[in-house]
Image (spheres, helix red, strand yellow):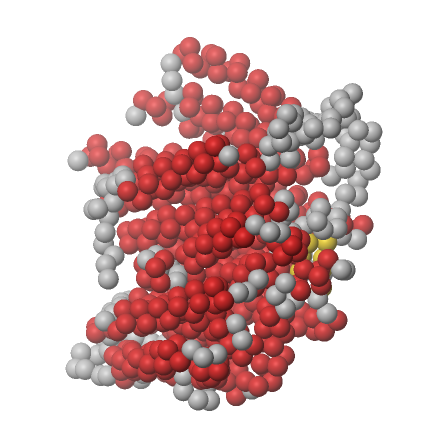
């Protein structure tokens, strides 16, 4: 139970960093922390006490494996996170070319 | 820009040895994807890292003369098309993505049907994709710094 | 044969980079051919539904071990919305995208967007829905930034940040559901939730899903990204965003989760109706003072989506039918309005209403179709918008919600006033300085706008047969509620 609460604390740190910090690169790091927290939460859901890694090798007799389904889902989620991070970094590089600054208070031409 | 020409001589000599080792390790992880952890995505990342290693040590031109942008995008699309093709192959058996290739004995290298081919397709796509992201982001640095030097 | 809706656009998206290295013009032919095939199959799917609900098991694995794809009434309605607007927008962008730097990349991203949207709609598994939702979102972030002007990039970054927060909240909700019922198949989750005894987890998941999907659909506390992202995209992409994307990944996913998995209860009903009422009023009040054509249309999108959520939140059969019919109509006329705004910008070069001159002489087709769309959004009979607003107002009175009905009527009047202003400044008023060199837009753009206007008029005239064939099965699929599980798992 404690591990789930700590995952949610990490998620809260990630959201704080994404919303409050003014530098664009720090926002990208904040998004990364949020995604790691969610992935960790998912994998911890699959833990069974005393279990071992869910890999079947020759001659192994396994009757206490942890749940492999969340692990497969998180592989997909990590790849999606990679795609979003790559896109964010590319847009941040182009924004620097146009506005000459990474500060979010200066990048504010759209109003209303 | 000194980085366009690569790093020092020691780094270049060591890189010539380690690039092939990293490549071999990546291929091992892809081919054993159904026996050990890893599979297509992890192996593809390692292969892309070996090419990025080349770019960092020798400068952009050395890697790009072997593998220019046209070829990268063709490899990436071929990987995606191969994956769709494997899915359509399952239609021969009646369902999309059915496992129609004969499955050998367990724990062999070529057991478990289409999973090996799927790993190969994903490896092509992920490796080419990551390398092209790196090239795209590092090309964009060039106009900015040369503008700054002109000022 | 359900996976064909995902195979065709994915195949096009992977083939386009190879094909365009051979010759430049082949990319748009391939993309248009793929979209036309999808439209054909989605019209045929109305007849597939006659033999009951269809389930397709991917890989032959039965649920709950495998992923399944489901075709029911709601799916057919959303497939029609996605593919009609997708096909017409691709026809429009044959000429529009020539002005941008790289048409090949545009067609690849657009085909990926279509693949993701079709995948969200036919998926029967909750994590599969999340994966396709992410594909759609990433393609739309990249397409919003396509113009690479300074304001486009800033709008896209804002959209990216808020969209990723929404996706992370949805993933957290899916994680909590997985932890409590240990399965991800939608039918199986609803069966396990109705027999379980812990109600607290359901409340947490409900809050997370309403926040996450509400951000995607731009309900009012979460609407901050929409007025920046919709004007900054190229015009065909604005039409897709406002007309299709926020409905598919927002309203459809929210309705699926709330009606078929968690089950409809009075808490959900009051939350949805109040959020609908607030969205309607805030959207239209903020739209009055706008002078930028596309930004005004974006604020009106917020208010019309408020109508749809209000109709769905009423929960009665008439209310759900009204909400779903308004969803279909809104995608038709809002896409037409955004395509008109794009045509105006293509010819004259600016979007500010007080700088535009009366264009009805130089651009007759654009001004006629814009007139049809404006009358339709304001709810003038016999065009399509009138029927759906009438059904929602009658349903609100029947469901003992007079506040909502009065707000609907007042918002409709303010919408009419706002669009009369648009028509006057953009198309009717002529001042002394006549802008020279303005002529009608090229053929493919005219074709797309004319077909959409004809569809608006036809759906308005043949409203009752259309309601019975398409909207009624969709409303029944939602009202079935938790029986959805029994229908799928029995096959």
Left or right of C54, for residue C467 = left
Would you say B16 lies left or right of C72 here? left
- The x and y percentages for residue B37 are 63, 28
- Dividing the picture into quadrants, the one containing residue A74 is top right
Residue furthest front as drawn: C197
Q: Residue A36: give x, y in percent of width and height.
A: 46, 35
How many numbered tags mark residues here? 0
Q: Residue at x 27, y 33 (%)?
A: B145
The front one of C432 and C413 is: C413
Residue, x 24% and y 83% (percent of image)?
C429
Residue at 54 percent across and 38 percent down: it is A42
Q: Is residue C153 left or right of residue C96?
A: left
Image height check: is B23 above or below A91? above
Location of the C terminus of chain C by quadrant is bottom right
Kindly indicate the quadrant of the structure image that contains residue C81.
bottom right
Q: Which of C337 and C394 lies nearest the eye of the viewer?
A: C394
Question: Where is residue C368 shown, x and y percent of the image?
Answer: 39, 83
């Amino acid at each position: 139970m404690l591990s789930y609460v700590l995952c949610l604390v990490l998620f809260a740190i990630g959201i704080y960093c994404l919303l409050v910090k003014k530098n664009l690169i720090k926002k990208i790091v904040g998004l990364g922390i949020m995604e790691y927290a969610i992935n960790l939460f998912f994998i911890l859901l699959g833990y069974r006490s005393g279990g071992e890694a869910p890999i079947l090798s020759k001659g192994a007799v396994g009757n206490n494996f942890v749940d492999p389904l969340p692990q497969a889902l998180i592989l997909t989620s990590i790849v999606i996170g990679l795609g979003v991070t790559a896109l964010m970094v590319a847009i941040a590089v182009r924004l620097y070319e146009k506005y000459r600054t990474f500060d979010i208070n200066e990048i504010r031409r759209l109003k209303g | 820009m000194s980085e366009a020409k690569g790093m020092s001589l020691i780094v270049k000599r060591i890189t010539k040895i380690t690039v092939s080792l990293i490549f071999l390790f990546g291929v091992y992880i892809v081919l054993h994807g159904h026996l050990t952890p890893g599979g297509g995505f992890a192996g593809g990342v390692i292969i892309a890292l070996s090419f990025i290693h080349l770019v960092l040590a020798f400068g952009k031109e050395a890697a790009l003369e072997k593998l220019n942008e046209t070829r990268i995008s063709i490899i990436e699309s071929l990987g995606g098309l191969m994956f769709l093709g494997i899915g359509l192959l399952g239609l021969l058996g009646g369902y999309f993505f059915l496992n129609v290739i004969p499955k050998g004995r367990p724990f062999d290298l070529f057991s478990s049907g289409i999973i090996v081919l799927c790993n190969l397709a994903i490896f092509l796509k992920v490796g080419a994709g990551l390398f092209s992201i790196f090239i795209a982001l590092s090309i964009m640095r060039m106009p900015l710094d040369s503008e700054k030097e002109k000022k | 044969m359900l996976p064909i809706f995902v195979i065709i656009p994915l195949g096009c998206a992977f083939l386009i980079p190879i094909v365009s290295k051979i010759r430049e013009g082949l990319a748009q032919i391939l993309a248009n051919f793929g979209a036309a095939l999808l439209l054909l199959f989605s019209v045929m799917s109305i007849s597939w539904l006659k033999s009951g609900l269809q389930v397709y098991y991917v890989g032959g694995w039965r649920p709950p071990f495998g992923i399944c794809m489901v075709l029911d009434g709601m799916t057919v309605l959303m497939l029609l919305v996605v593919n009609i607007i997708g096909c017409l927008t691709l026809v429009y962008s044959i000429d529009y995208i020539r002005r941008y730097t790289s048409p090949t990349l545009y067609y690849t991203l657009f085909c990926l967007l279509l693949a993701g949207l079709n995948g969200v709609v036919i998926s029967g598994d909750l994590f599969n829905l999340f994966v396709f939702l992410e594909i759609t979102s990433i393609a739309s972030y990249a397409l919003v930034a396509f113009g690479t002007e300074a304001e486009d990039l800033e709008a896209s970054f804002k959209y990216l940040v808020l969209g990723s927060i929404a996706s992370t909240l949805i993933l957290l909700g899916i994680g909590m559901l997985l932890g409590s019922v240990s399965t991800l198949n939608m039918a199986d989750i609803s069966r396990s939730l109705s027999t379980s005894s812990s109600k607290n987890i359901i409340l947490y998941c409900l809050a997370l899903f309403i926040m996450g999907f509400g951000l995607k659909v731009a309900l009012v506390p979460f609407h901050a990204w929409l007025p920046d992202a919709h004007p900054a995209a190229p015009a065909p992409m604005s039409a897709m965003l406002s007309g299709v994307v926020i409905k598919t990944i927002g309203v459809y996913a929210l309705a699926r989760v709330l009606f078929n998995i968690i089950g409809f209860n009075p808490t959900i009903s009051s939350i949805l109706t109040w959020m609908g009422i607030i969205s309607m009023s805030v959207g239209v009040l903020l739209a009055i003072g706008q002078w930028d054509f596309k930004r005004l249309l974006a604020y009106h999108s917020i208010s019309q989506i408020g109508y749809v959520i209000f109709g769905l939140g009423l929960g009665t059969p008439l209310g759900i039918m009204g909400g779903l019919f308004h969803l279909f109509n809104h995608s038709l006329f809002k896409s037409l309005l955004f395509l008109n705004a794009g045509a105006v910008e293509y010819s004259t070069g600016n979007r500010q209403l007080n700088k535009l001159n009366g264009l009805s002489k130089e651009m007759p087709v654009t001004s006629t179709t814009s007139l049809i769309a404006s009358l339709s959004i304001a709810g003038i009979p016999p065009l399509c918008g009138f029927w759906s607003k009438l059904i929602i107002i009658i349903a609100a009175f029947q469901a003992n919600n007079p506040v909502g009905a009065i707000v609907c009527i007042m918002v409709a009047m303010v919408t009419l006033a706002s669009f009369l202003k648009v028509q006057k400044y953009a198309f009717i008023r002529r001042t002394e300085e006549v802008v020279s060199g303005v002529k009608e837009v090229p053929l493919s753009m005219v074709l797309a706008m004319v077909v959409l206007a004809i569809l608006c008029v036809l759906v308005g005239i043949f409203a009752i047969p259309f309601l019975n064939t398409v909207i009624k099965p969709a409303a029944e699929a939602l009202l079935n509620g938790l029986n959805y599980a029994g229908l799928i798992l029995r096959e």
